[in-house]
């Protein structure tokens, strides 16, 4: 049985967009959807204050109403909900089983009782050991495109989980997968070297493209129906990949697991803040 898609839900527009994305994904995978709502905890051996009981009642009502609405609009969807006592980042990370995917609104506005903020999404994305998809809660919920863009750096550790996620998503959606690599321009003025001509720049791009093909080939052979294209561009990875979201249905990025404090790199931050399509962040070694 497919693992559930766990949606951080608080009733805000971004969390509603996240729930819709998860429902659409579930129709492709047969996975169930679970709406997870974090609320402040309360000890069972202490009488609960009226305010707590009221908030909990409203949360249950919100979740129940949303689940019923989504069942009516997505026939056959397996969907349920869960209340998680505690801080949102910790509880959402615990709610996701190993191998499952967390789906969050990328620009949370506080929504119901201010319990799921934008900072929650960033904290979860930086700490998760499994895929996290962040969905923007704009007025127009439709993504700007259909195909998938994979932002890929060369020589960055073991990226099999990232490649596998991107290829699997492309196959499920019958979409093309566009592999984009950003090269920083050489600082010729600080080295005293002669800037390369067009022939040299073309050779460098072709070499990078061939390395991209070699990197993805072993896994791509398991997804023979996925249409692949490669694009090596010169410039800032953050700027290039944000521009790519103007015509993508999903942007897939990797995140290195850190031994020190967990953090998101500048490229991921830029994609989450300025990208126009959902962004999937996949942890890797």
Image (cartoon, rainbow, N blue to C red):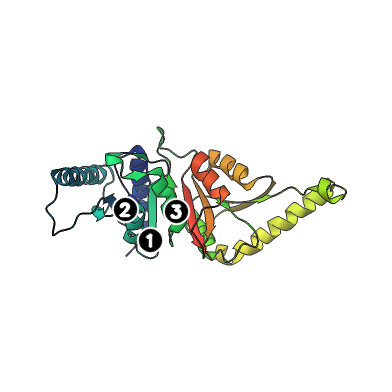
The answer to whether mark 2 and mark 3 are in CB contact below 8 A is no
- Label 1: few (<14), some (14–19) or many (≥20) C-alpha neighbours in 10 Å: some
Report the Cα–Cα distance between label 1 and label 2.
20 Å
Please give left or right for residue 41 compared with residue 141 in the image.
left
Give the percent coordinates (x, y) of residue 127.
Answer: 44, 58
**Where does label 2 land, which residue?**
87
From the top left corner, tell me how far across and down residue 93 is, in percent. Answer: 36, 58
Q: Nearer the viewer, mark 3 or mark 1?
A: 3
User: Which image quarter is the C terminus in?
Assistant: bottom right
Instruction: Specify whether 32 is left or right of 207.
Output: left
Point 79% across, 49% down: residue: 201
Query: Dot 3, how many residues are within 10 Å of its Cα: few (below 14), some (14-19), or many (20+)?
Result: many
Q: What residue is pinned by disc 3?
A: 125
Mark 2 element type: loop
The image's mark for residue 100 is 1
Q: Residue furthest top?
A: 139
- Measured Cα–Cα span from mark 2 to mark 3: 15 Å
Taking depth in this image into account, of 248 and 237 the one nearest to the observer is 237
**What's the CA distance linking mark 3 and mark 1?**
14 Å
Say which label, 3 or 1, has the lower sequence index. Answer: 1
Which residue appears at 53% of the width and 57% of the height? 254
Task: Decide: few, some or many residues near mark 2? Use Cα within 10 Å; few <14, some 14-19, many ≥20.
Answer: some
Q: Earlier in the sequence, mark 1 or mark 2?
A: 2
- Residue 150 position in % (x across, y down): 56, 52
The image quadrant where one finds the N terminus is bottom left
Please tell me which residue is depicted at 59% across the width and 65% down the height of the picture: 157
- Of callouts 2 and 3, the N-terminal one: 2
Task: For residue 232, say whether it is visible.
Answer: yes
């Amino acid at each position: 049985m497919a693992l559930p898609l766990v949606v951080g839900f608080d009733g805000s527009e971004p969390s509603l967009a996240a729930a819709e994305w998860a429902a659409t994904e579930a129709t492709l995978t047969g996975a169930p959807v679970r709406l997870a709502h974090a609320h402040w905890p309360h000890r069972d051996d202490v009488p609960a204050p009226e305010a707590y009981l009221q908030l909990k009642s409203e949360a249950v009502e919100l979740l129940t109403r949303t689940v019923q609405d989504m069942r009516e609009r997505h026939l056959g969807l397996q969907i349920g909900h869960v209340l998680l006592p505690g801080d949102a980042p910790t509880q959402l990370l615990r709610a996701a089983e190993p191998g499952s995917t967390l789906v969050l609104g990328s620009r949370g506005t506080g929504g119901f009782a201010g319990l799921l903020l934008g900072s929650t999404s960033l904290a979860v994305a930086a700490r998760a050991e499994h895929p996290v998809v962040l969905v923007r809660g704009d007025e127009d919920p439709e993504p700007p495109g259909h195909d998938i863009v994979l932002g890929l750096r060369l020589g960055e550790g073991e990226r099999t989980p990232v490649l596998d996620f991107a290829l699997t998503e492309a196959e499920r959606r019958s979409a093309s997968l566009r592999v984009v690599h950003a090269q920083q321009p050489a600082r010729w003025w600080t080295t005293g070297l002669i800037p390369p001509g067009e022939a040299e720049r073309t050779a460098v791009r072709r070499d990078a493209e061939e390395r991209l093909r070699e990197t993805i080939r072993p896994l791509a052979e398991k997804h023979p129906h996925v249409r692949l294209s490669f694009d090596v561009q010169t410039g800032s990875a953050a700027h290039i990949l944000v521009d790519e979201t103007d015509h993508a249905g999903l942007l897939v990025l990797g995140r290195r697991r850190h031994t020190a404090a967990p953090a998101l790199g500048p490229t991921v931050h830029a994609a989450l803040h300025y990208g126009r399509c959902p962004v999937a962040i996949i942890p890797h070694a």
